[in-house]
Image (spheres, helix red, strand yellow):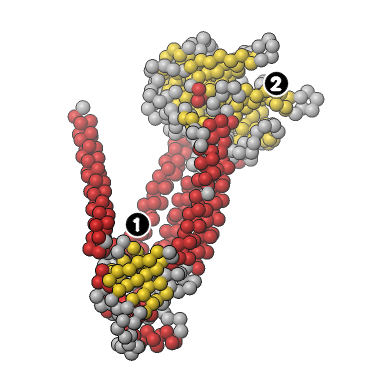
């Protein structure tokens, strides 16, 4: 029964490793999937009611905040991340979703895409406004730095591109139609842009900067706006992360007037005037903030049932944000379990050096190492372990070679991984490329001219890395190690290493010659026939140093003793780096404790 214990531990180790792989895949899936349920956003006024989107549904409210109906996005065959919502009739909504503009009949639960020229298929942020008679559609195409105006043909009933407003546009965000003028939140230009069509048919532009001393530092990017009955413009101004916005009031002449302080941390998506109140949808805190026209914060908008749903969605989003930490923490705990199982299963014994030379029980005949492939090899190994059955005369050169095909599995995995990484990099490049259109990387940040071509080079990095690893793996199959009983010489690819045997350190994993490292095993798998390696090389060199710790490869000790001044410089440099990191860590902890102490005193 005791002989079966290592096998049972080994199966347990495999199960733990498989579970770790599943947790890592879950972490990756969590990273690439949708960020979870969104909070309230996209407020749209329709008559005496208000519509908004939240936690996967459209919700309709009356003037008192009572919810009248709820329509799941799935029932309309829409994704959970629309970027624009507007009503032109009582049950007719215009929605931008999945890079297309949809006209939705809510009575029939039917959304039909509208064909619009010049819009690509990439999913991105677009703000759509439609005239009351649905004859004109204005699309703010932020990633391409333009505003597109479409008009419907009276005969064909199709929408054709009437004009494109691109001059001076940088990440144009939400738009607002005021009489004969169209106002655009020109985010990267830090202004409200007013567009009018002149008598000659040309567009007349007026820029209105949003700079105000009371805006918090970094809040310079306007993205949403609404006009109150007095003609004042309420503008949400965010930082570079497009979160934690300030609310800026601009007078009827579009001059910055005053700043209304909001919560320190919030994530408003839009602002709308409804029943003499300004409503701000806060996606992070899952609430709809309500302000009167003087800027005073009132109670949140919505009835008790809606507030309860928001609280549940908030808890779900909180756990969703904690999920990556929980997954990584679970992987770390499982790593400790795997280490204990590896110790019990005898896997860690493979790291030993001196015992490997002295103890025949720790030979390839042990179940933790591969056995000789043929009966002749087994007989030769047994004879070598028994003594000098196959004596090697002094001065005779013996050489051991890496097993051909010992890296074949690794190379196949490398091919699969390389293909996957190329697909992922290509997809990322395809989706990220619009961000660099007209050389704007992010709000307020201009891209260097070389960056687009640099991205293409970056996409080739996995291919270049894979080629280098492929050459490295093939070089491992061409390793030659020889000795005459006094000197040791090794060749790895085009590199050659040579030193007296007493200055060479051997571990179960590698051979250390000067500053060179010659691998003997690759991730636990033998690169050599270990019976021949033991007989023709290790047993001939009793003066060779054998490192006997399962926790260290002995590299630093070897560099210090046998690496010359370069090796000692490396060891001292590494020690200085670790000491500096430890000093910085202790300093940060002391400063943090001092900060909390001073905060408590204040």
List the residue tagged with mark 1.
333
Q: Residue at x 67, y 20 (%)?
A: 132
Image quadrant where residue 60 sits: top right
Residue placed furthest toward the bottom:
389
Q: Which quarter of the figure is the C terminus placed in? A: top left
In the image: residue 330, left or right of residue 437? left
Quick one: SS at disc 2?
loop
Q: Quadrant of the N terminus?
A: bottom left
Judged by depth in the image, the label closer to the viewer, 2 or 1, is 1
Which residue is located at x 55 percent, y 18 percent? 193
Label 1: few (<14), some (14–19) or many (≥20) C-alpha neighbours in 10 Å: few
**Left/right of residue 596 with respect to residue 77 in the rendered view:** left
Where residue 523 appears, as percent x and y from the top left, is 40, 65
- Decide which of 479, 252 is in the foreground and name it: 479
Q: Nearer the viewer, residue 309 or 472?
A: 472
Residue 287 in view of the camera: no
Q: Give the mark, 2 or 1, whose residue is nearer the N terminus.
A: 2
Mark number for residue 133? 2
The residues tagged by marks 2 and 1 sit, at their Cα atoms, a distance apart of 62 Å
Establish if 9 lies above or below 456.
below
Number of other residues with Cα within 10 Å of mark 2, as a class: few under 14, some 14 to 19, many 20 or more:
few
**Mark 2 touching mark 1, by CB under 8 A?**
no
From the top left corner, tell me how far across and down residue 578 is, in percent.
25, 50
Q: Quadrant of residue 557?
A: bottom left
Using the image, determine if residue 324 lies above or below residue 367.
Answer: above
Q: Position of residue 271 (x, y in %)?
A: 51, 23
SS assignment at label 1: helix
| Residue 455 seen from this side | yes
Q: Residue at x 31, y 66 (%)?
A: 513
């Amino acid at each position: 029964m005791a002989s079966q214990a290592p096998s049972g531990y080994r199966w347990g180790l495999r199960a733990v490793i498989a579970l770790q792989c599943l947790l890592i895949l879950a972490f990756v899936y969590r990273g690439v999937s949708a960020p979870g349920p969104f909070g309230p956003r996209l407020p749209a006024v329709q008559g005496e009611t208000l519509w908004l989107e939240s936690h996967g549904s459209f919700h309709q409210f009356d003037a008192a905040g009572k919810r009248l109906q709820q329509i799941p996005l799935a029932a309309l065959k829409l994704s959970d991340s629309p970027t624009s919502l507007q009503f032109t009739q009582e049950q007719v909504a215009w929605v931008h979703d999945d890079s297309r503009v949809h006209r939705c009949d809510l009575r029939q639960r039917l959304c039909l895409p509208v064909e619009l020229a010049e819009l690509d298929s990439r999913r991105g942020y677009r703000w759509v406004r439609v005239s009351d008679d649905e004859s004109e559609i204005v699309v703010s195409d932020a990633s391409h730095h333009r505003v597109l105006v479409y008009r419907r043909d009276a005969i064909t009933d199709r929408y054709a591109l009437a004009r494109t407003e691109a001059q001076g546009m940088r990440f144009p965000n939400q738009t607002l139609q005021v009489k004969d003028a169209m106002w655009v939140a020109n985010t990267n230009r830090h202004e409200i842009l007013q567009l009018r069509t002149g008598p000659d048919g040309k567009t007349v532009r007026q820029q209105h900067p949003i700079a105000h001393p009371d805006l918090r530092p970094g809040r310079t990017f306007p993205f949403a706006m609404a006009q109150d009955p007095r003609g004042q413009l309420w503008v949400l101004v965010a930082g570079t992360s497009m979160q934690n916005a300030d609310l800026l009031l601009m007078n009827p002449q579009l001059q910055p007037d005053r700043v209304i302080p909001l919560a320190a941390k919030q994530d408003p998506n839009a602002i709308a005037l409804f029943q003499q109140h300004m409503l701000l949808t806060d996606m992070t805190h899952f609430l709809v903030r309500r302000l009167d026209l003087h800027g005073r914060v009132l109670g949140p908008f919505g009835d008790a049932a809606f507030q309860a749903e928001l609280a549940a969605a908030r808890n779900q989003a909180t756990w969703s944000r904690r999920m990556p930490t929980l997954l990584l923490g679970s992987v770390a705990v499982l790593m400790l379990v795997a280490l204990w199982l590896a110790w019990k299963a005898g896997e860690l014994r493979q790291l030993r050096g001196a015992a490997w030379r002295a103890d025949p029980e720790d030979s390839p005949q042990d179940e933790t190492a591969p056995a000789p492939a043929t009966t002749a090899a087994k007989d030769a190994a047994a004879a070598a372990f028994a003594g000098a059955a196959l004596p090697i005369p002094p001065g005779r050169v013996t050489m051991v070679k890496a097993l051909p095909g010992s890296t074949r599995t690794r190379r196949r995995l490398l091919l699969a991984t390389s293909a996957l990484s190329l697909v992922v990099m290509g997809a990322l490049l395809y989706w990220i490329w619009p961000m660099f259109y007209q050389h704007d990387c992010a709000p307020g940040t201009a891209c260097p001219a070389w960056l687009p071509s640099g991205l293409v080079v970056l996409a080739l990095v996995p291919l270049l890395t894979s080629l280098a690893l492929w050459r490295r793996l093939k070089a491992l199959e061409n390793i030659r190690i020889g000795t005459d009983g006094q000197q040791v010489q090794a060749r790895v690819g085009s590199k050659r290493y040579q030193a007296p045997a007493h200055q060479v350190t051997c571990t179960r994993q590698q051979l250390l010659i000067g500053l060179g490292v010659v691998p003997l095993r690759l991730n636990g798998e033998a690169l050599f026939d270990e019976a021949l390696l033991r007989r023709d090389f290790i047993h001939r060199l009793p003066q060779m140093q054998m490192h006997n710790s399962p926790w260290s490869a002995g590299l630093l000790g070897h560099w210090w003793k046998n690496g010359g001044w370069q090796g000692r410089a490396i060891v001292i440099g590494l020690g200085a780096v670790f000491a500096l990191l430890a000093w910085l860590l202790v300093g940060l902890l002391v400063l943090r404790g001092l900060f909390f102490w001073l905060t408590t005193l204040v």
